[in-house]
Image (cartoon, helix red, strand yellow):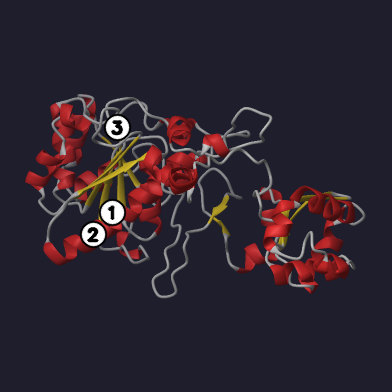
Amino acid sequence: MTDQAERKGPLTHIRVIELGQLIAGPFCGQLLADMGADVIKVEPPGKGDPMRDWGRGDYPLWWTVCARNKRCVTANLRVPEGRDIVKALVNEADIVIENFRPGTMEKWGLGYDVLSEINPSVIMVRVSGYGQTGPYSSRAGYASVGEAMGGMRHLSGYPDMKTCRTGLSIGDSLAATYACLGALAALEHRNRTGEGQIVDSAIYESVLNVMEATIPEYTISNYIRERSGSVLPNVAPSNVYDCKDGSFVIGANQDTVFKRLCAAMDRPELADDERYATHIARGANQNELDDIINAWTKTKTMAEVDALMIENAVPAGRVYRALEMLEDPHFRAREAIVDVPHKKWDNLKMQNVFPKLSKTPGEIRWAGPEYGEHTEEVYGNLLGLSGDDIETLRSKGVV
């Protein structure tokens, strides 16, 4: 049986019921579980969360990360008996997470009006494409669309190419992160008042909230940012440069840092050149400055450039993949990547809990569990169902 007393982190007193599937809701659950919350993930009987089949390489491994530290049970929300189980779980919970299309929970009789009657202090975290209100709320919404509507896709890629994605499901992850932030804020309110509430996290608004000054730039200056590839327009030098054996990122756009870069390049005169002496001048002459730096880096290896950047205190670094991350001593020293026990793989590694807390750090106790692995444990210990009760429900397709 899982020893819940061994959970570590600041949220060990919190219980979360996670409904929904794929990324946005479950990543919110992962963040809470990483910090010690008892997250009980409810999957439909017979098939489970599609994330169990997602990933690349020889095996679908995304599940091992997004479902880590969670207890997994099954319940059919489309039948009354399954919904009764969820209601019983909600009575024992602090937070409910769901990321179905708005209206689905209400259709099942599991809207906030019902759940708050059962447990007035419960916090309902709702993650969706467009939010719970507004004319688009009932539309199906995926991260790709939210990233587009929120403005991120317009800025992703190069000016002479159509917009592209970042290579990750960033819209889902942002919505989940804001949902987690909202849940923690709602917990603070509940601690002071005893009241639960709804946390409404929309993918498109989560993207919108990291779009810097794009809105006021347009409304005040009629300026619309465009795709700029690897550079940050008018901020130089800050780019990816070619070395003999790979690519290297250098960020030396501050005046004093630029002087140190010039010294590292043995080109101190560049720091006094009127074309590059100030932030504004470097921005206006960004392309030619990048050409000068790139001509220099092409004469050296990445290790040589790295050593010179460290010696001269210039922010710089290699473009890492998983391979380089695993070999880097700083990653090891900070335990940014850790080994996680698994029944099938002896060498399962993944990113560690983050952020790091000095007094109550979270930890990874187990990777994403087997389908329905904790059904008997949770329903027996938390809801008082007997083994026979659970078997009867299973035979009826309820769990």
Residue 295 sits above or below residue 48 on the image? below
Q: Name the residue under label 3.
A: 100
Alpha carbon distance from label 2 to label 3: 22 Å
Alpha carbon distance from label 1 to label 3: 17 Å
60 vs 20, left or right, is: right
Alpha carbon distance from label 2 to label 1: 6 Å
Q: Name the residue under label 2.
A: 187
Q: Are marks 1 and 3 in contact (CB under 8 Å)?
A: no
Q: How far across and how far down the image is residue 345, in percent?
A: 57, 45
Circle 1 sits in a helix, a strand or a loop, which is it? Answer: helix
Task: Identify which residue is drawn at 20% across, 32% down.
Answer: 105
**Does the rendering let one see residue 117?**
yes
Q: Do the residues labelled 2 and 1 touch (CB within 8 Å)?
A: yes
Task: Identify which residue is drawn at 55% across, 39% down.
Answer: 168
Q: What residue type is labelled 1?
A: Ala
Most foreground residue, 65 or 216: 216
Most foreground residue, 338 or 105: 105
- Return the mark for residue 183: 1
Q: What residue type is labelled 2?
A: Leu
Q: How far across and how far down the image is residue 289, in percent?
A: 80, 54
Most foreground residue, 11 or 301: 301
Q: How far across and how far down the image is residue 262, in percent?
A: 83, 67
Circle 3 sits in a helix, a strand or a loop, which is it? Answer: loop
Task: Identify which residue is drawn at 65% across, 41% down.
Answer: 228
Is tag 2's residue or tag 3's residue first in the polypeptide sequence?
A: 3
